[in-house]
Image (spheres, rainbow, N blue to C red):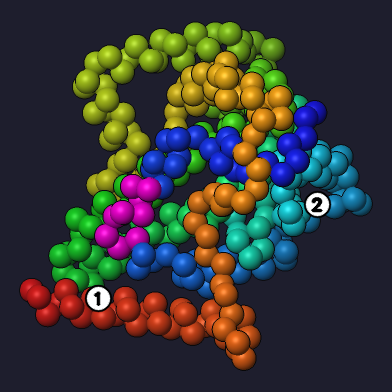
Amino acid sequence: MPTYTGISSEAFRHPLDREAEQSLRSIPGFDLVARKFIEFLVERPQYVFLMGNSIQVGPRQYSSIYRIFRECVRDLDIYPEPNLFISQTPLANAYALGQDYPYMVLNTGLLDLLEEDQLRATIAHELGHIKCGHTTLMQMATWAISATFFLADLTMGMSRIVSTSLVLAFYEWLRKAELSADRAALLVVDDLNPVMHTMMRMAGGSTRYAHECSLDELVRQSERYQHLDEDGLNQVYKFFLYNNISQGVFMTHPFTVERITYLRDWANSNEYAQIRAGNYRREGSRGSVDVEATPSEGRSPRGERVEQLRQEIERLQNEIDRIKSDR
């Protein structure tokens, strides 16, 4: 497997990921919920839960999975090494979160469904999110839908338009971020087929009937799907399938056939060929949101974080008061 020493996430980040993040940042209200909220509301409790209720992977715990994980960490040049947990959940899924304590979770349902090369592709995909700095925004997205609609209720619905825009922008970015992580998986596995096989398994795979699934047929299905976009009405349908605003349900991943199309195009691109040849952008460029705390002199890092959180909550309250006074 190739190793991309010193590679920057900007070397493989999908332009739609970058554009969607820029759009997200421009939505009113983004700065209000950014930075420190997630650290206190999501990251630490979840990390404590995983430490207490899942299996942490290591040299003497799921050693074969740990070997694959370490190789993927090396190939994408990720440091420090994130934590890896196995969770007893039948749903075939994996995710990566955390900034101060980055970690990845693999569900047991996933381990029972995928073969080794497909598991490698999945691990590399999740590490791609960590490499790109996606994890903070991902945590914010899971929190934003409840937080922003709660804010709308506090302000008698006056901020509902802004809130809905912010939620839509979060989830549009989430879907585009998957395209960058798919590229990371391809770089590590160095073979398009295992990555697409993984997508097929996740879309509708069966351990018992896996021999009856054809990747070639799924590729042809993805090509047929592209023709649907020629009808503008189908584009409208797709928007509402992605964003069920009335029920507050939003898809976090693009349709599988869309991901296959995007990845096949990149696998045949000169950009991908140049990276494989060692001609890629090196570290020095950050991925998504950078929220590192810079402690002030004479104050502990924790004290600095608490103070910043207090100030942001105060700004939030001032914004709510201002909207109420303008009614």
Image quadrant containing the C terminus: bottom left
Which element carries disc 1, helix, strand or loop? helix
Residue 326 found in image quarter? bottom left
* Within-10-Å neighbours for mark 2: few <14, some 14–19, many 20+: some
Residues in magenta?
Answer: 22-30
**Membership of 91 in magenta stretch:** no
Which residue is labeled 2 in the image?
Answer: 57
Q: Main secondary structure of the magenta part?
A: helix
Residue 28 in the figure: left or right of residue 221: left
Query: Circle 1 sits on which residue?
Result: 319
The answer for how far apart the CA atoms under marks 2 and 1 are is 44 Å
Q: Amino acid at mark 2?
A: Val
Q: Nearer the viewer, residue 205 or 15?
A: 15
Q: Residue at x 30, y 42 (%)?
A: 244
Seen at 39% across and 15% down, the residue is 225
On residue 255, which mark appears? none
Q: Position of residue 31 (x, y in %)?
A: 36, 65
The question of residue 28 being in magenta is answered with: yes
Residue drawn 62% across the image and 51% down it: 284
Q: Amino acid at mark 1?
A: Glu
